[in-house]
Image (cartoon, helix red, strand yellow):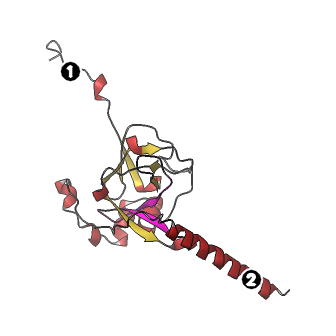
């Protein structure tokens, strides 16, 4: 058999596998509802942040605001290597915000160990803060997760997570900043003597 014939048969076989996988995913309805990003202010915005016109920022503006990796992940829809990000194994209480615009996205209370090497959550802080779009790259149907304020790529959501939602928001650490929750139960109030 000639090499060109072998290559042709391999291409046909790969195409059939991709088509079957895509149809199986569509038949199982594994794509969570798609919600396009609404770049701009969201309910409860800090007035200073609400004044920023996120859709007017240029590529040069974003490159000045972000590290090379943050820019690649959030603005070019890249993916960091598994088990390499700052937050994949973070167990501290707090909130995860968008690295581009500081919008609160996920609470550590909904974070779980997925074994994938990326931070995984079963629910966002608010559906208003997270957008979803169909992603057909890499020959498969996935659902991309974006910041609803600035349109930053965060990662993807899958329907293989834990209860109560059954969702796994698989995110890039480079797309997030973490705000640790302070334990106020250990703080002491000043006494009359110390005042």
Q: Residue at left 48%, top 47%? A: 86
Q: Nearer the viewer, residue 195 or 35?
A: 35
The kind of secondary structure the magenta stretch mainly shows is strand
On screen, residue 190 above or below 181? above
Q: What element carries label 2?
A: helix
Q: Which of 133 and 100 is in front in this view?
A: 133
Residue 134: horizontal and vertical position, in percent? 43, 70
Q: Which residue lies under the disc numbered 2?
A: 9
Q: Look at the image and give the residue range highlighted in magenta.
A: 141-160
Return the disc, 1 or 2, that comes first in the chain's sequence.
Answer: 2
Locate residue 184: give its quadrant. Answer: top left
Image quarter in which the N terminus is found = bottom right
Q: Nearer the viewer, residue 192 or 138?
A: 138
Q: Say whether residue 152 is magenta.
A: yes
Q: Say whether residue 60 is magenta.
A: no
Q: Residue furthest top?
A: 193
Locate residue 169: give its quadrant. Answer: bottom left
- Return the mark for residue 102: none
Residue 179: horizontal and vertical position, in percent? 35, 43
Q: Residue at left 78%, top 87%? A: 5
Q: Which residue lies furthest to the front in this view?
A: 27
Q: Is mark 1 on a helix, strand or loop?
A: loop
- Return the mark for residue 189: 1
């Amino acid at each position: 058999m000639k090499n060109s014939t072998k290559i042709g048969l391999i291409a046909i076989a790969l195409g059939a596998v991709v088509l079957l996988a895509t149809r199986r995913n569509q038949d199982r309805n594994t794509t969570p509802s798609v919600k396009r990003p609404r770049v701009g202010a969201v309910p409860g915005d800090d007035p200073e942040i609400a004044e920023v016109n996120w859709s007017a920022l240029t590529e040069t503006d974003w490159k000045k605001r972000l590290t090379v990796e943050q820019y690649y992940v959030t603005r070019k829809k890249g993916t960091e290597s598994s088990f390499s990000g700052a937050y994949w194994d973070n167990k501290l209480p707090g909130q995860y915000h968008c690295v581009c615009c500081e919008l609160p996205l996920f609470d550590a209370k909904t974070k779980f160990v997925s074994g994938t090497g990326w931070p995984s959550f079963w629910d966002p802080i608010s559906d208003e803060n997270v957008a979803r779009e169909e992603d057909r790259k890499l020959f498969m149907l996935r659902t991309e997760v974006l910041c609803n304020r600035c349109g930053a790529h965060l990662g993807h959501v899958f329907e293989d997570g834990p209860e109560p939602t059954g969702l796994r928001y698989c995110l890039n650490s480079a797309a997030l900043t973490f705000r640790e929750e302070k334990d106020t139960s250990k703080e002491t109030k000043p006494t009359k003597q110390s005042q």
